[in-house]
Image (cartoon, rainbow, N blue to C red):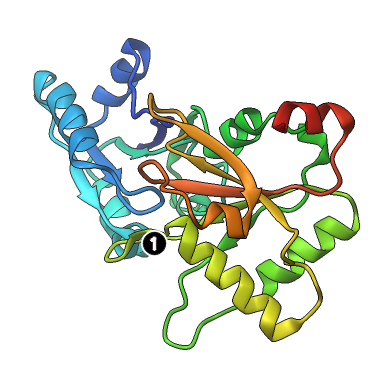
Amino acid sequence: MSLLLLAGLGLDFGISDEKLKQIEKCKTIFLENYTNLVSKGEMGKLKTIFQKTKKGIIVLGREQVENEKIILDAMANGDVALLVSGDPLIATTHHSLVLSAKKANHKTKIIHSSSIISAAISESMLQVYKFGKIVTIPFPRNGFDPTSPYENIGFNLKNGLHTLLLLDIDSEKGAMPPNEAFEILEGWEKKLKKKVITEKTKLLVLSSIGKDDSKVVYGTIVQLRKLKFNNPPHCLILPAKLHFMEEELLA
């Protein structure tokens, strides 16, 4: 029986001394590089940390993590740490891996950290209890262009709930830029015509949240399209009807 340690790196890819102690006890250390693409600077920072402990990092892409074989095979030889940006289980991405480890009679442990979900809502100054279902805007792929995100935004608006929109990340295309997300939203509106996205629709664009150059801007799509945004990753928030205090904070 081995241990699967899922260690969150937060938004700044920081590793505290206590977190490092737990990670370096593991025989094998993996870093997943697809739920949030790791920059060269961040990768160098991590490698420097683990070189000092004489432990290397094995970088895994989406298929390698979702296939699970590499990770589960490594657990046959000892404890394994999987480093994940943000908070490891805030999304469902790694739930299957945890379940597979448990079915193989391995132990699991989670080291939590900051997540884009809590950070974006906090930075927006909008009231957390007024948020509805979270939506991801995916890159269209080989005819795959789901409209369920549009439907979920409409449901949230109808019920007076704000929508956090996470933008897709692709190993080849990189992080989706806000302008492409605007085009996809407008495309869904033209297709479904339910007046979820209109000329008056206002959005928040949040850039580089958790980093020194983080920025939040608010406006209509027409206004936002004219702007240059900070470095990725980005996310959007589409507010429903605002509380008077929310209006003042966004003004």
Q: Position of residue 114 (x, y in %)?
A: 51, 28
In the picture as drawn, the residue positioned furthest to the top comes out as 17
130 on left or right of 176: right
Question: Percent position (x, y) of residue 51?
Answer: 10, 25
Query: Is residue 75 in view?
Result: no
Q: Quadrant of residue 222?
A: bottom right
Does the image show residue 6?
Answer: yes
Label 1 neighbour load within 10 Å: few <14, some 14-19, many 20+:
some
Circle 1 SS class = helix
Residue 142 in the image, given as x and y percentages of width and height: 42, 86
Q: Position of residue 43 (x, y in %)?
A: 20, 37
Residue drawn 38% across the image and 30% down it:
9
Compared across the picture, whether 189 is left or right of 212 comes to right
Residue occupied by mark 1: 66
For image coordinates 10% across by 18% down, the residue present is 52
32 to the left or right of 100: left
Residue at horizontal 18 percent and vertical 41 percent from the top:
40
Q: How many tags in the picture?
A: 1
The residue nearer to you, when weighing 59 against 178, is 178
Q: Is 70 drawn above or below residue 53 in the view shown?
A: below
